[in-house]
């Protein structure tokens, strides 16, 4: 993480008439009591983030946790009250407007919760819109738009208007549009919250498929932990404008930093999150193994084998046995029982 | 004045009895004041002394004089600037007129040579019907054809085209201007705060009042009328634009910025297209208001249908007046339908079927080409252009006979109705209003403002009321209030029950809606024609015309308010064993009252705007003052009287809006 594509330092966003009082030299300071007394709301405070090139970073929290405000600060849609947002080491707030427009035109894309499709344009027109804004000639931008529409599986519907499409299809248009400029940084602001659960899963798979092909840096906002687990490399959990914890889904489940995170992850689908490495016990010399499991494999992938066998399985990494997993250990973890002998 | 002080003294009383007793006390005091002999109060309380008057109108007149004769920007005078402005505005206007009505002519008088003839009626009908078909399909094209054929057959064509030219140019200017001003208001909140009250005044002030300053600034001619039209028709467009642009979802704005739109791209590629369906509603309003004013303005010599109606009325040629009036109606309905179809179309995706679309496009191109060829043909064969006189129809004589028959047969009945209402309603109310001492009326208005919206509202409405006395137009203002008040009460007595009845019966509602839509589409002027025929001029005629024009919003808002109530509440009422009548009186009506009040508010506004037109049939109110000032070219008097009308409207508006808002808040309907 030596060279993050996007980073922020001490970002805070305050709302209220007296907000300026709590910012000094670009730093935010103030206790919740002082803020409340002045009638100021801190939607985001003291946020530090480093987002690595190519990772899928999920910001999750319930409504009112400040996640939407934070993403608006990260994309420079709202100027933060304090702190800095660095895109490839350049402060988005300090750069001239022309530079910011250039970065947005070529390096950023965003998908919105309510799709934000333009009602007067067709699917083709909507997808080509960001290119139109750049002044790209019609033939060229429509060719590119056709590619994107094909990518999201909407070919044949280019001439439709947004209101003629289902919600899932509309969001596919939103996705195609956000990818049309070939962005490096891809924001998805609660992209599937307005969709039915079944469609939501389908769309999550779509994002995973696209990410497998395109390898963008993704900042994904959601209030749904299952969704976060499905798509994320790392997850930041927000509460009351602060980040409670950042880590992989596995780290959050195994080592919750606060009670809030613990409560949040309690009902998480552990079998899909935890790997063999995190549940294995220290191997006893000369033990008899039923088979081998890769250290990075998730429980869901090997649970069936382990359950069926009375003997433990060996956990291997680079061909070396680094631990063992047996039925009991697996069940302990899945039902969330405290364990005494978790390997480091 | 001792009575006026009584409310402030009773402030020390405990809160609850004071609230309950305030309005009964005011009522009793008013009754006593009216019955007092003239000697009981000092003379200045009965009649505002002329020595205290502020000579506002001479000041304004003098200022205008100075502006036009002396004022200068250094290099050029104000006079030069306004005339240059008028000249610029005249370009599109005379172009449209030449194109539609007169043809492009070089030279003057008998030496005039037509270079390019105006579009002949057959080409114009073709173009309009094709445009109607393209925008609204067969349902629009057929009425368009029938309406235009009426204009030709009944010999109204050239007047109608003069009117149409003015309406088109002023609606285009008004729509674009309104949109730009609306966009500016969205961008700069401070501008919005400044513009909003100006719009209020511009909308409530009678058109006559600003025709005058326009005449002085821009010279006598159609341009002045057009500027006045645009000013009158623009406010709704500004309002609609502000609301429509603000209603664009925040995400769309964010999208614009994320895709790196410049400010201009954001406005013209995203905001305006996204808000287009709503904006078209504003355009429709601009067109209808423009037509309304163009008709009125044609009385000051701009020609067109309004002039035809007026001259027919003056010569008591009822038939001719009626035919021209119907022509205005036809024009109004066609324009309205066309604009509505445009609005609907902008909210709907175009045809999917590629072949049908291609066929339609070809058919349109062929029809247009044919129209152009025929037009060119008239340039070489001018004698084919006019509609042959032999084919012309007129129902004028029939109407003349019908009206004389009605007047002869039913004279005593009509006269009896008129006299009865005059003697029993109009004259007593008028006497009562004039008998009230002005300080007391100002005080009542202020108290109402204070009770409904606090001291700030009290100050605003109080000062507005005081203005009427201070400029010396108290009497005329009270006559306006009386005529307007009686009309509004009658409108409400008719409108509210009709609205309630219609809200619960969809079939009835369809009929009622068609009727009030038509009533509202007609230019104010048209109402006068049949009524003058039956009742001749006077307050009673004015009353009927006002009620007809102003009853529509009372019906519409009532029906809307009653129908809109949540079905859960109705179900709850039914489950509690309410009868239909109880559901109406216990649930629907109480909850609909805020909405009904807004309807009454609209009724008052329409009544005021109609009232000024009725000055033409000899009322003695502010409308007459404005109208007389127009005849005498007395800018100051016209403007001041116009302000009085505007203030009456604004007092009513502010008080009713405050009341409705308070009631809504109390019932938890809206914050």
Image (cartoon, coloured by chain):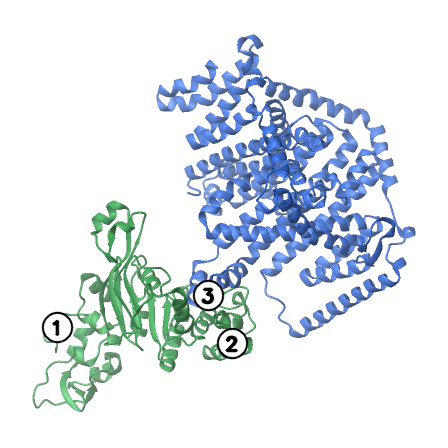
Q: Which residue is mark 1?
A: A339
Question: In the image, what residue occupies the spot 81% across and 26% down?
Answer: B411
Chain B shade? blue
Q: Nearer the viewer, mark 1 or mark 3?
A: 3
B27 sits to left or right of B614? left
Question: In the image, what residue occupies the spot 55% across and 42% down?
Answer: B199
Residue B444, given in percent of the width and then of the height, sits at 49, 23
User: CA separation, marks 1 and 3?
Assistant: 55 Å
Chain A shade? green
Residue B82, given in percent of the width and then of the height, sits at 63, 45
Q: Which residue is mark 3?
A: B261
Q: Are marks 2 and 1 in contact (CB under 8 Å)?
A: no
Q: Is residue A75 visible?
A: yes
Q: Which residue is mark 2?
A: A141
Q: Residue furthest right?
A: B390
Question: In the image, what residue occupies the spot 44% across and 36% down?
Answer: B662
């Amino acid at each position: 993480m030596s060279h993050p594509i996007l980073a922020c330092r001490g970002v805070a966003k305050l709302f209220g008439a007296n907000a300026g009082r709590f910012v000094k030299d670009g730093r935010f300071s103030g206790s919740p009591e002082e803020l409340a007394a002045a009638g100021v709301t801190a939607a985001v405070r003291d946020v530090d983030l480093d987002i690595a090139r190519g990772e899928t970073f999920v910001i999750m929290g319930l409504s009112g946790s400040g996640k939407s405000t934070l993403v608006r600060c990260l994309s420079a849609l709202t100027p933060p009250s304090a702190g800095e947002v660095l895109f490839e080491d350049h402060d988005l707030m300090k750069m001239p407007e022309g530079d910011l427009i250039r970065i947005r035109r070529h390096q950023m894309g965003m998908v919105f919760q309510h799709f934000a499709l333009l009602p007067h344009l067709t699917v083709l027109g909507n997808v080509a819109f960001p290119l139109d804004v750049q002044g790209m000639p019609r033939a060229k931008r429509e060719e590119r738009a056709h590619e994107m529409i094909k990518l999201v599986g909407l070919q044949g519907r280019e001439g439709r208007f947004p209101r003629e499409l289902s919600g899932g299809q509309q969001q596919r248009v939103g996705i195609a549009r956000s990818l049309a400029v070939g962005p490096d940084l891809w924001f998805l602001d609660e992209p599937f919250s307005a969709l039915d659960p079944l469609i939501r899963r389908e769309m999550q798979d779509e994002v995973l498929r696209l990410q497998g092909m395109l390898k963008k840096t993704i900042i994904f906002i959601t209030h749904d932990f299952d969704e976060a687990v499905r798509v994320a490399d790392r997850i930041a959990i927000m509460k009351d404008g602060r980040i409670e914890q950042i880590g992989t889904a596995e780290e959050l489940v195994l080592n919750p930093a606060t009670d809030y995170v613990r409560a949040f992850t309690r009902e998480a689908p552990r079998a899909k999150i935890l790997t063999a490495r995190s549940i294995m016990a220290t191997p006893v010399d000369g033990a008899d193994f039923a088979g081998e499991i890769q250290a990075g494999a998730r429980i869901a992938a090997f649970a069936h084998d382990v359950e069926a066998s009375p003997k433990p399985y060996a956990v291997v990494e680079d061909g070396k046995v680094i631990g063992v997993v047996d039925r009991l250990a697996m069940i302990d973890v899945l039902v969330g029982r405290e364990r005494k002998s978790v390997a480091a | 004045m001792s009575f006026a002080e009584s409310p402030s003294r009773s402030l020390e009383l405990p809160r609850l009895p004071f609230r309950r007793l305030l309005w009964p006390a005011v009522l009793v005091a008013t009754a006593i004041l009216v019955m007092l002999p003239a000697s009981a109060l000092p003379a200045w309380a009965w009649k505002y002394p002329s020595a205290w008057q502020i000579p506002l109108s001479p000041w304004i007149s003098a200022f205008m004089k100075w502006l036009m004769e002396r004022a200068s920007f250094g290099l050029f005078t104000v006079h030069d600037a306004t005339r240059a402005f008028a000249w610029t505005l005249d370009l599109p206007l005379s172009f449209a007129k030449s194109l539609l009505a007169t043809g492009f002519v070089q030279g003057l008088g008998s030496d005039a040579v037509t270079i390019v003839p105006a579009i002949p009626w057959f080409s114009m009908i073709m173009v309009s019907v094709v445009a109607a078909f393209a925008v609204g399909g067969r349902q629009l094209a057929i009425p368009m054809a029938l309406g235009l054929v009426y204009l030709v057959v009944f010999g109204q064509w050239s007047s109608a085209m003069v009117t149409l030219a003015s309406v088109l140019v002023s609606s285009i200017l008004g729509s674009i201007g309104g949109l730009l001003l609306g966009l500016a208001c969205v961008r700069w909140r401070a501008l919005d705060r400044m513009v909003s009250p100006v719009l209020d005044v511009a909308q409530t002030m009678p058109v006559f009042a600003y025709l005058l300053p326009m005449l002085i600034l821009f010279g006598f001619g159609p341009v002045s009328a057009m500027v006045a039209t645009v000013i009158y028709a623009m406010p709704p467009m500004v309002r609609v634009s502000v609301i429509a642009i603000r209603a664009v979802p925040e995400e769309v704005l964010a999208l614009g910025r994320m895709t790196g739109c410049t400010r201009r791209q954001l406005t013209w590629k995203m905001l305006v297209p996204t808000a287009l369906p709503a904006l078209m509603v504003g355009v429709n309003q601009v067109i209808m208001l423009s037509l309304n004013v163009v008709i009125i303005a044609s009385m000051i010599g701009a020609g067109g249908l309004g002039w035809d109606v007026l001259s027919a009325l003056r010569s008591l040629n009822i038939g001719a007046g009626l035919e021209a009036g119907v022509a205005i109606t036809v024009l109004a309905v066609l324009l309205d339908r066309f604009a509505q179809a445009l609005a609907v179309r902008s909210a709907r995706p175009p045809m999917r079927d590629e072949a049908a679309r291609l066929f339609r496009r070809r058919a349109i191109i062929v029809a247009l080409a044919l129209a152009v060829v025929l037009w060119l043909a008239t340039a070489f064969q001018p004698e084919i252009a006019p509609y042959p006189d032999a084919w012309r129809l007129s129902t004028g004589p029939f109407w003349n006979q019908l009206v004389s028959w009605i007047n002869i047969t039913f004279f005593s009945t009509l006269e009896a109705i008129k006299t009865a209402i005059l003697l029993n309603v109009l004259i007593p109310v008028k006497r009562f209003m004039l008998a009230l001492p002005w300080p007391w009326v100002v005080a009542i208005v202020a108290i109402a403002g204070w009770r409904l919206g606090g001291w700030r509202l009290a100050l605003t409405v109080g000062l507005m009321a005081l203005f009427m006395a201070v400029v010396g137009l108290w009497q005329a203002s009270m006559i306006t209030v009386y005529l307007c008040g009686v009309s509004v009460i009658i409108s409400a007595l008719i409108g509210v029950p009709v609205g309630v009845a219609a809200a619960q019966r969809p079939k009835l509602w369809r009929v009622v809606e068609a009727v009030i839509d038509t009533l509202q589409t007609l230019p104010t002027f048209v109402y006068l024609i049949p009524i003058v025929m039956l009742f001749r001029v006077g307050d009673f005629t004015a009353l009927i015309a006002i009620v007809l024009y102003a009853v529509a919003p009372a019906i519409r808002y009532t029906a809307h308010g009653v129908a809109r109530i949540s079905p859960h509440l109705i179900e709850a009422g039914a489950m509690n064993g309410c009868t239909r009548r109880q559901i109406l009186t216990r649930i629907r009506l109480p909850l609909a009252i805020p909405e009904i009040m807004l309807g009454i508010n609209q009724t008052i506004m329409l009544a005021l705007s109609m009232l000024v037109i009725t000055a033409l049939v000899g009322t003695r109110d502010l409308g007459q003052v404005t109208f007389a000032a127009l005849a005498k070219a007395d800018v100051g008097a016209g403007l001041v009287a116009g302000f009085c009308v505007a203030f009456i409207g604004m007092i009513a508006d502010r008080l009713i809006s405050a009341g409705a808002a308070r009631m809504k808040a109390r019932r938890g309907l809206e914050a």
